[in-house]
Amino acid sequence: MAQSDLEATLQANGYAKVIVSLRKDVGGLATANGHEAPSLAAATTSATESSLESHFILPNEAQVENLALASGRNFALATAAKSRRVRVYPRLGLAIGYADRTGIAALENDPRVEEIVHAAQPSLIRPVAAKTAKLAASTSWGLRRLNIEALWDAGFTGQGVVVGHLDTGVDGTHPALKSAIAAFAEFDMTGERVPNAKPTDSDRHGTHTAGTIVGRAGGKGAFGVAPKAKLASAMVIEGGQVIDRILGGMEWIVEQDVRIMSMSLGLRGYTPAFEVLIAALRSANVLPVIAVGNEFASTSRSPGNYDNVLSVGAMGEDEMVADFSSSQRFNRPNDPLVPDLVAPGVDVLSCVPGGGYEKMSGSSMATPHIAGLAALLLSAKPTASAQDLEKAILASCSLVPTMPAARANRGVPDGAKALALLTGAPLAVAATTLGPKKVKTAKKHTPWKKQAA
């Protein structure tokens, strides 16, 4: 949020929650891909928290304690939550806590601190529509539209890739996902990680987005873009101290060494509050793939409207930008128009908790298509950086005549083109369980056309 919002909160409450960006030379902070051993990171993080805690306060201790109890999953966390003034995320180089004017002044004068921002409370970008559906004996229209099958036929199905997934969690027992979870973390209402949590979904949203990224193909059809990739999924939204939960999830996925993060949440409008978060992810070589929002034209959400994320809007099978899909132009030299591109986001078939399937519509449904595409590209070139993946996807886009540039920006990506741009070589078909049984020259894929219902 703007500084005036921080000031307004200080005037109203006498304190505010702030995110502090720490200098990279602060002792104990891991950087990029040079992570410390967990034991060392834990010890040095604790020392850093202790040295910073005098700048922070604990307002409403009873409220914080009851929030921990309200999580209902780990009551033992209440005591720790009550006594903890600041939480440090060493891999992100960030800290979060409540501070009054005296504390903020002390932080501003602390040589370890680079920046202080007001910690906003984002919300889930919920689907605009959802309906029960059954699997059809075909590949989903979204996968066909992005030319995903061409990558499968070339042997690239996401093998060896783990995608970060920050959402409402994931149902790890669903037949389409039970072999797709590499790691799972749940963060309770105060932002503490719940020990030994099993992959579960607190809603339906997370399982649906997860299915679009890595859903396993069955005898009745395919809907997961990268069916051999896996997820590092964290339950971070909604409810409780959301920003603490999201920071915890981001710190955790960086610890998992993921290179791609799919996230469908944010604050309505533009706020720089998440800039330090996104900058931390980019410096850790993670590509943030984020939904732009579902509030129609001339609107967007942060951080999906930042110039350093891969911002995704929604399109329908009719080759039109979905009417609900957000789009907005900003007064900035780099990437002034969002979203960066559009992807299938209307009547998207994927899985939901309990073994079922639903069609949902929203930019939240478009975003995992692009995260899955990035996973396919990374399986083709494991040495590619986050910037390499982003550049190839953006350069593969084309704007179709039915989509105004003001709404779709670069248009729709093409998987085969993105792969050729990334690797510098034409597509070649390799042996794969989803493709041909023998290596041969690539078959020619005809341009996508809408199939009759």
Image (tube, helix red, strand yellow):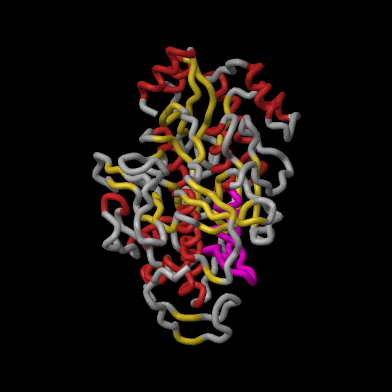
Q: Tell me which corner region of the image, top left, top right, bottom left or bottom right, holds residue 437.
A: bottom right
Counting every numbered tag in the picture gives 0
Left or right side of 330 for 301: right
Instruction: Write the start and end of the magenta stretch as one range.
Output: 206-231
Q: Nearer the viewer, residue 213 or 102?
A: 213
Residue drawn 61% across and 57% down? Answer: 357
Image coordinates for residue 154, horizontal then vertical, percent: 49, 77
Residue drawn at 26 percent across, 54 percent down: 405
Residue drawn where x is 50% and y is 60% of the image: 372
**Which corner quadrant of the image does residue 359 belong to?**
bottom right
Residue with the most extreme front position = 453
Please tell me which residue lies in front, 17 or 444.
Answer: 444
* The N terminus: image quadrant: top left
- Residue 102 at least partly seen: no
Q: Is residue 438 magenta?
A: no
User: Which of 226/328 is in front?
Assistant: 328
Q: Is residue 388 visible?
A: yes
Whether residue 213 appears in magenta in the rendering, the answer is yes
Q: Is residue 235 above or below residue 109?
A: below
Location of residue 262 in the rendering, given as x and y in whole percent from the top left corner: 50, 50
Residue 93, above or below 35: above
Estimate the x, y position of residue 195 in percent, counting from the top left: 72, 40
Question: Horizontally, is 86 left or right of 13 in the view?
Answer: right
Q: Position of residue 259 (x, y in %)?
A: 50, 55
The residue closer to the viewer here, 95 or 432, is 432
Q: Quadrant of residue 258?
A: bottom right
